[in-house]
Image (cartoon, rainbow, N blue to C red):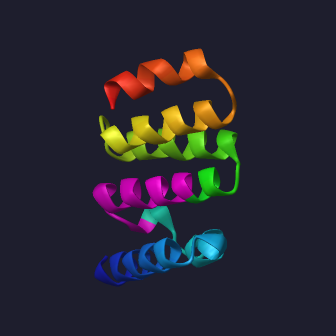
């Protein structure tokens, strides 16, 4: 619905402008209420927030959510590669980095 999409986009903009509070800005957004492209964008924004907070496993989960919503998004591979690099899992970072 349009209202859910508007709320999600507002939350994403706030999260981007205030990375330290990104999780708080995104907390009230229900992905199930969004169309698939916006659901993927929300998942990638949550992946970015998780990476900024050093939560690599959460970032990987969010990248998977983005793929579920919209398969083949290069940004999901970028998030995966970044999470693996942060975790020191260099060999695991190579395949998603190459796909990106």
At a point 49% along the width and 78% down the height, the residue shown is 17
Percent of width and height locating residue 50: 63, 54
At a point 42% along the width and 46% down the height, the residue shown is 66
At a point 66% along the width and 41% down the height, the residue shown is 56
Q: Quick check: 52 left or right of 95?
A: right
Per the rendered image, the range of residues in magenta is 33-48
Is residue 39 found inside the magenta-colored segment of the image?
Answer: yes
Q: Residue furthest top?
A: 91
> If the image is split into quadrants, where does the C terminus sit?
top left
At a point 54% along the width and 51% down the height, the residue shown is 47
Q: Is residue 10 above or below residue 16?
A: below
Q: Quick check: 1 left or right of 17?
A: left
Percent of width and height locating residue 72: 30, 35
Is residue 64 found inside the magenta-colored segment of the image?
Answer: no
Q: Is residue 43 above or below residue 77?
A: below
Q: Quadrant of residue 13?
A: bottom left
Q: Main secondary structure of the magenta part?
A: helix
Percent of width and height locating residue 99: 33, 25
**Does residue 27 appear in the picture of this structure?**
no
**69 or 89, nearer to the observer:** 89
Q: Quadrant of residue 6?
A: bottom left
């Amino acid at each position: 619905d349009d209202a859910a999409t508007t709320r999600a986009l507002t939350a994403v903009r706030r999260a981007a402008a205030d990375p330290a509070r990104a999780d708080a800005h995104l907390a009230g957004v229900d992905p199930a209420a969004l169309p698939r492209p916006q659901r993927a964008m929300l998942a990638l924004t949550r992946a970015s927030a998780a990476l900024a907070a050093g939560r690599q496993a959460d970032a990987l989960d969010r990248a998977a959510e983005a793929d579920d919503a919209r398969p083949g998004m290069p940004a999901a591979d970028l998030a995966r590669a970044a999470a693996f690099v942060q975790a020191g899992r260099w060999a695991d970072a190579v395949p998603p980095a190459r796909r990106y």
